[in-house]
Image (cartoon, helix red, strand yellow):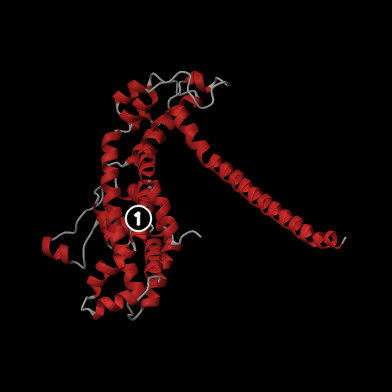
């Protein structure tokens, strides 16, 4: 009897332990299930428009009106892409876009990195005011200085030196120089945000390694290149990826500075304007090709527009497919997410 009574507490403890383990398993499985549902739901919301756009770029008109066709075209065609390719002058627009985006990405990453390091490590008069102005550029849209930028690069000069030497200012519109100058001087797309991110990243690095390098005789630039730069590889990768994507999708600066020279956004805008009725914008050869399509049907216009959008976004999709592993790792290590 005494043995049975003594065993009761042990049995109760074992039962409680089992219930506790079961509750933990239920919470773990339930949490994983909830996360999976949210992840699948958000992925579907993001990917559904992309998958639909890509599939419709290869469809013919009869597939659009066929309710049994969802994503896989029944009448596969490359005619939409061929027309978009020729009417957008895609090879030339792609070459211009790559030249500008790659160059500006490298220039603004380097310039923002130096400025961010200066704000993080050096003390000078007006530092707080200047940094406040940098943060202010994040809040003020570039459209507010559109007129000033246009006039500045229409009559470009550096403190009157160019006009004094040549007798006239430089006309830099319809060239790539405005993009290069703005990126190199810290005024490119999202440069204020990039400077802020670099500054926060450098501030989070320990000063002991810098101080040890300076004790060994390294100057500020040697310390930056040898100590700080290797420690900022992940944040540099993040900035490069963000800069490339934002530069690729930019329509403001490219529309402001370029007139005859076209990048992919302008090429697509011209293409889309032609689809919606501005036939005078495109030459006779394109008009002859377009006569094969029924532009009175909005579904046909949507198919051709999807083909143009696919050509614009295809290099970005390829770029992300190649670099997505580095992108995710750099975001996690940069501290931008928890």
Q: Is residue 220 above or below residue 322?
A: below
Q: Is residue 160 left or right of residue 224?
A: left
Residue 299 position in % (x across, y down): 50, 25
Residue displayed at 51% across by 37% down: 49
Element type where label 1 sits in the image: helix
Residue displayed at 28% across by 55% down: 106
> Visible in this render: residue 257?
yes
Residue 140 quadrant:
bottom left
Please name whichever residue, 322 or 67, is drawn nearer the observer in this view of the structure.
322
In the picture, the quarter occupied by the N terminus is bottom right
Residue 311 position in % (x across, y down): 37, 34
Q: Is residue 41 left or right of residue 91?
A: right
Please name whichever residue, 19 or 287, is drawn nearer the observer in this view of the structure.
19
Tally of marks: 1
Question: Would you name the residue on which mark 1 appears?
Answer: 237
Q: Is residue 191 above or below residue 293?
A: below
Q: Is residue 296 above or below residue 216?
A: above
Q: Is residue 39 above or below residue 63?
A: below
Residue displayed at 83% across by 61% down: 3
Residue 291 quadrant:
top left
Residue displayed at 32% across by 33% down: 88
């Amino acid at each position: 009897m005494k043995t049975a009574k003594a065993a009761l507490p042990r049995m109760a403890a074992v039962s409680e332990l089992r219930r506790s383990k079961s509750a933990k398993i239920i919470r773990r499985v339930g949490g994983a299930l909830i996360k999976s549902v949210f992840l699948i739901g958000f992925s579907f919301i993001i990917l559904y428009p992309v998958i639909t756009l890509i599939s419709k770029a290869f469809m013919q008109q009869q597939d659009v009106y066929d309710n049994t066709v969802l994503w896989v075209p029944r009448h596969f065609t490359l005619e939409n892409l061929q027309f978009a390719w020729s009417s957008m002058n895609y090879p030339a627009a792609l070459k211009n876009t790559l030249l500008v985006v790659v160059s500006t990405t490298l220039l603004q990453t380097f310039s923002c990195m130096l400025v961010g390091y200066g704000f993080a490590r050096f003390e000078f008069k007006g530092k707080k005011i200047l940094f406040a102005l940098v943060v202010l550029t994040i809040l003020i849209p570039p459209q507010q200085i559109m007129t000033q930028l246009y006039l500045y690069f229409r009559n470009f000069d550096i403190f009157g030196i160019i006009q004094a030497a040549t007798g006239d200012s430089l006309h830099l519109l319809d060239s790539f120089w405005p993009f290069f100058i703005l990126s190199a001087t810290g005024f490119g797309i999202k440069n204020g945000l990039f400077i802020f991110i670099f500054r926060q990243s450098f501030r989070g690095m320990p000063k002991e390694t810098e101080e040890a390098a300076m004790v060994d005789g390294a100057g500020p630039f040697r310390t930056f290149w040898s100590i700080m730069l290797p420690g900022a590889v992940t944040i540099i990768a993040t900035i490069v990826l963000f800069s490339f994507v934002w530069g690729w999708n930019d329509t403001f600066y490219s529309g402001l500075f370029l007139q005859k020279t076209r990048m992919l956004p302008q090429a697509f805008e011209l293409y889309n304007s032609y689809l919606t009725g501005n036939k005078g914008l495109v030459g006779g050869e394109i008009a002859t090709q377009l006569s094969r399509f029924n532009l009175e049907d909005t579904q046909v216009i949507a198919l051709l527009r999807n083909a143009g959008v696919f050509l614009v976004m295809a290099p970005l999709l390829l770029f992300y497919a190649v670099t997505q592993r580095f992108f995710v790792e750099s975001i996690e290590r940069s501290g931008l997410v928890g």
